[in-house]
Image: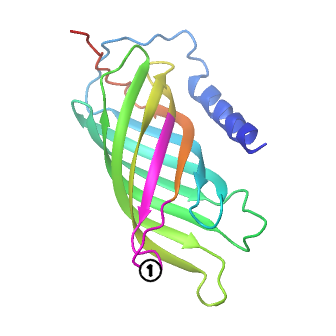
Amino acid sequence: MRMKAMLAAIAVAAAGCIAGKLTAQVAPAARAGGFPISVGVGMSGYYLDWGDSRWMEGPVIRAGVGLYHGIGVDFSARSIFMNTPSDLTRMQQSTFLLGAFYNAPSIGRVHPFARYSGGIGLIEFPSRNPLYTRDTYTVYAVGGGVEYQLTRKAALRAEYEYQFWKDFQSPKYLNPQGVTLGVNYYLRGRHVRPHTLN
């Protein structure tokens, strides 16, 4: 049921991005003036690393700018708060991360990427102390995935991310991880670097 809800949300977002553009084609060597700027939305499903097999979902927004030969910077804001397990009185994990990414050369319409980011994590959690039910931590994250180009400006995006919440209530780390499905929209059209076989 959760996956159906996620896929429905992604389908609606994708339809909105490509409405009226179904006849557009991806130009394999398309170039646009200025830096390629992208904005995106998605739905994430995350293993919380809190107790046994805790899984929740939530939305994410993202904005990025390509700088040089596939290297760029981006910002993401994610809040995992949906479908709280019944045995948790409260739980929410939100991150605000600034990062760097690398878009590998494309293979047809498929664009692999990797990213590293860091920032702040805010967590609400069950506690015996009613005055201590939320806290903030330094968060680092590594991830990667692929985008599938629908038109010159719109792409479906799938990403896996592994997070490190530093010194989480002890010297150890909290390590949430999960997947995100969404759409990305390139304001000027995407700079495409085709993969070449030698």
**Residue bearing the label numbered 1:** 170
**Could you tell me residue 145's position as x and y percent?**
44, 35
Q: How crowded is mark 1: few (under 14 residues within 10 Å), some or many (20 or more)?
A: few
Looking at the image, is 71 positioned above or below residue 119? above
Looking at the rendered image, the quarter that the C terminus falls into is top left
Identify which residue is drawn at 31% across, 28% down.
104
Residue 172 is one of the magenta-drawn residues: yes
Badge 1 marks a residue whose secondary structure is loop
Looking at the image, is 136 positioned above or below residue 95? below
Instruction: Using the image as rendered, state which of residue 39 and residue 80 is in the foreground.
Output: 80
Specify the segment rendered in magenta. Answer: 158-175
**Could you tell me residue 13's position as x and y percent?**
62, 34
Instruction: Using the image as rendered, state which of residue 182 and residue 88 is in the foreground.
Output: 88
Looking at the rendered image, the quarter that the N terminus falls into is top right
Looking at the image, is 92 positioned above or below residue 194? below
Residue farthest along the front direction in this orientation: 52
Instruction: Using the image as rendered, state which of residue 173 and residue 119 is in the foreground.
Output: 173
Q: Which image quarter: residue 106?
A: top left
Identify which residue is drawn at 53% across, 63% down.
94
Identify which residue is drawn at 55% across, 16% down.
21
Residue 128 is one of the magenta-drawn residues: no
Q: Which image quarter: residue 31?
A: top left
